[in-house]
Amino acid sequence: MRMEGSVDGVTPGDGVTPEVDFRVELAEVSVAVAQAVAAHLVDERPLRLDQSTKSSATDVVTQMDSAGEEMAKRMLAQRRPGDGFLGEEGTAESSSTGLVWVVDPIDGTTNYLYRHPAWAVSVAVMEEGRTIAGCVCAPLLGMTAHAHRGGGAWFRQGGSERRLSVSSESVLSRSLIATGFGYTQQRRVSQGRLLARVIAHVRDIRRCGAASIDLCWVASGQLDGYYESGLHLWDFAAGALIVEEAGGIVTTVPGESVWSAHDGTGDRSAPTATIVAAGRGIHSDLVGVLRQAEDEVVFG
Ligand code: IPD
Ligand code: CA
């Protein structure tokens, strides 16, 4: 029987040691910023969005992406002076504290543009190349997911918290797997070829259009797994911690930790290797299928 993935009646503050207290505080900052930016993106969405393009003609950015990033940066500078900042839309500040906030102001910009609800604000704080606290807020899905390292992953709804755990599925052919596609034609051709191989081994495929939401759905057991090649740090910085804290595993296809898959700078010219997130029951089988498929597919 499939496990739904939640444990009620406990809160994120229960049982913390003093050393994780600070991470609880950072998680609260990430929730406050993600929720405030998300509310702004809903309330202040103009009738007409200005659109320009980034890496390709399909990679759209709007004035709300820039406004969201600016707002996140302002809020974090007030609450955490001295911390660094890295935003998808180009803002970068160095850190004097060792902590760096990594923000995607709208993950799923195409969904935001077309008024599909699966878009999110992703806010993570990293130390020594690993996320230690973060939040993904998808306001139109009613979802605020957050985590701090060592303290579990949680859905916050109204005043209550529900603990997340990944699915217990152990058979890949019964697994619901999500993926996503980048914006350049060459990469999409490789991703399509990879998908053609993976789909033969799984129950079905989903593509929601926001990596951070896919990761949260792995954490909540609403997906059994997720993989994508070519993500950037801001796409997975919060979501990967949420999966790990929900008991899942997030690695590259060679099997290295997700935190080794980036250089910490969010370099736009250097998207990461394929990232695989899943529960323990299927993670290695999914990696195995992807490894074999990648051997047959040349990535662009
Ligand atoms: C994109 C979304 C999408 C994923 C792409 C990302 P953006 O982020 O997360 O699901 O497939 O790889 O670039 O551009 O909407 O912030
Ligand atoms: Ca984005």
Image (cartoon, rainbow, N blue to C red):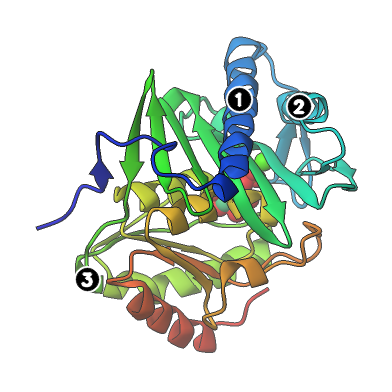
Name the image quarter holding residue 243: bottom left
Task: Indicate which label's residue lies in the foreground, 2 or 3.
Answer: 2
- Identified at 46% across, 48% down, the residue is 151
Q: Position of residue 93 (x, y in %)?
A: 89, 43
- Identified at 41% across, 29% down, the residue is 156
Secondary structure under badge 2? helix
Q: CA distance from mark 3 to mark 1?
A: 36 Å
Q: Amino acid at mark 2?
A: Arg
Q: Position of residue 39 (x, y in %)?
A: 58, 17
**Residue 210 visible in the shown view:** no
For mark 1, does the 10 Å Cα neighbourhood hold few (<14), some (14 to 19), or many (20 or more) residues?
some
Q: Nearer the viewer, residue 3 or 63?
A: 3
Mark 1 CB near ligand 2 (8 Å cut): no
Name the image quarter holding residue 247: bottom left
Q: Position of residue 86 (x, y in %)?
A: 79, 45
Secondary structure under badge 3? loop
**Residue 44 visible in the shown view:** yes
Q: Nearer the viewer, residue 172 or 297?
A: 172
Q: Earlier in the sequence, mark 2 or mark 3?
A: 2
Quadrant in the picture for the N terminus: bottom left
Q: CA distance from mark 2 to mark 3?
A: 43 Å
Q: Which residue is mark 3?
A: 170
Res. 79 mark: 2
Q: Nearer the viewer, residue 256 or 286?
A: 256
Q: Which residue is mark 1?
A: 32
Q: CA distance from mark 2 to mark 1?
A: 10 Å
Q: Amino acid at mark 3?
A: Ser
